[in-house]
Amino acid sequence: MASVDTSELGIVVVGTGMMGTDHLRRIPQSIAGARVVTVVDADSARAAAAVKLAPGARTAASLTEALSHGDVGGVLIATPGDSHHALVLEALEARIPVLCEKPLTTDAATSRLIVEAEVAAGQRLIQVGFMRRFDKQFLEVKNAIRDGGLGSALVGRFVHRLDVAPPRFTEADLIPEAVVHEFDTARWLFDDEIESVEVLKPRANAHATQQLAGPQLIVIRLAAGGIVVVDANMDSHYGYEVSGEITLEKGTVEFGRPSGVTYRRSGALTSDVTPDYRARFVDAYNAEIQAFVDGVRDGHLPGPSAWDGYVATVVVDAGVAAQQSGKVETVSLPDKPAFYAE
C-alpha cells in the first residue's frame, strides 16, 4: 500500500449521489483517524456543493486528478455500478486501498478481471461494501452459528422490503440492486457457496409500482444442503425492513426486528419501522468505514473481499436468469484462489 499520513488517512470520495454524500457527512462526524481530502464528480456544480460537507477537502473531476495530489491513503467509490470496473482498476494500479460500494462491477467477467488484477498485485487492496457484515445483529447471528452450540445452520428465511419502490425501479433491478445483499449474507452466515437460484412469483400486488408486479420469493440452495428463502418486496407500503430467522439443529436465531419501544395499547401492538436502509444500517456503515480505515493502517483489509464481490455478481447473473426463465438456475464458480483464504 502507498505511504500515508500517520495522523489521518486521506480519503478520496468518488461520487456525490445519495450514498456518496452520506459518506461525506459520516467521515468527519463519525470516523476516527481519517479525513476526506478530495471529492470527485464529473459534474463540477455537484462536487462544489458536496465538498462543503468535508471541511478542508478539494474537488476533482476524475480519480486520476485526485490521485495526482499525493495525499491519498484510500479511495471510497460510491458511483453507479457501471463505472466501478475502471475506477477500481485505477486504484489498484496506483496501489491505493479501495472501499467499493456494491456491486464490485455489473457483470461477472469484469469482476473476475478485478480479482485477477488484485491477485497479481499480491496484496489485498479491495473491500466491497456489503455493510450487513458490520451490523451488530448480523454479527451476533454469525457468532451464534460459528459457536456451534446450536448445531449447524439448516434453513434461512430472509425478508427484504422497501416502503415504496423508487420511480426508476423495475423488476430487472430487484436482484442486482436489492437481493444481491441476501446472496452475500447467505454465503457469509452459512459459510458456504450458493449452488442454485430459483425465483417464484406469487399473485400480483394491485398497489405495486407500475413496473413491479409485486413480491418475489428467491430460493437459494447452498452446497452443503442449506436452503435460504428470500421474501423480496419493493412495495411493502409500511416502511423498510431487513430481517430474518435461521433454523439450526438445536434452535433458531431471529434478527432485524425493531429495537425501539413496542407499545400495547388500544387493542394493538405497535413499534417503529425505519424509513430506509440508511436509517436501519447507519451504525453498520460507520463500522464498515472505520474497519476499512483501521485495516489500511494495519496493512490488512477486513470484510468482504473482491472475491466476495465477484461471487455475488455470478450469483446475481444466475438469479436474473431464474427470474426470466422460471427455472432453477445453477451457479458455476471457479476454484477460490488461495490468495483469498482466511
Image (cartoon, grey):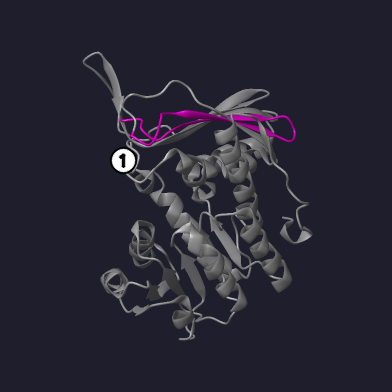
Q: Residue furthest left?
A: 266
| Front one among 330 and 97 | 330
Q: What is the quadrant of the C terminus in the image?
A: bottom right
SS class of the residue under badge 1?
loop
Residue 251: x and y in percent read: 61, 23
Tell me how many marks there are. 1
Q: Residue furthest bottom?
A: 69
Residue at left offset 33%, top offset 24%: 206
Left or right side of 239 for 63: right
The residue at which mark 1 appears reads as 275
The answer to whether residue 290 is seen in the rendering is no
Density class for disc 1 (Cα within 10 Å; few <14, some 14-19, many ≥20) is some
Find out whether residue 117 is within the magenta segment: no
| Front one among 150 and 3 | 3
The answer to whether residue 236 is seen in the rendering is yes
Q: Is residue 9 above or below residue 168?
A: below
Find out whether residue 230 is within the magenta segment: yes
Residue at left offset 52%, top offset 61%: 100
Residue 129: x and y in percent read: 51, 55
Q: What is the quadrant of the N terminus in the image?
A: bottom right
For residue 304, which quarter of the picture?
bottom right
Q: Is residue 43 above or below residue 284?
A: below
| Front one among 316 and 31 | 316
At label 1, the amino acid type is Pro
Residue 171: x and y in percent read: 45, 38
Q: Residue furthest front?
A: 325
Magenta segment boundaries in residue numbering:
209-237
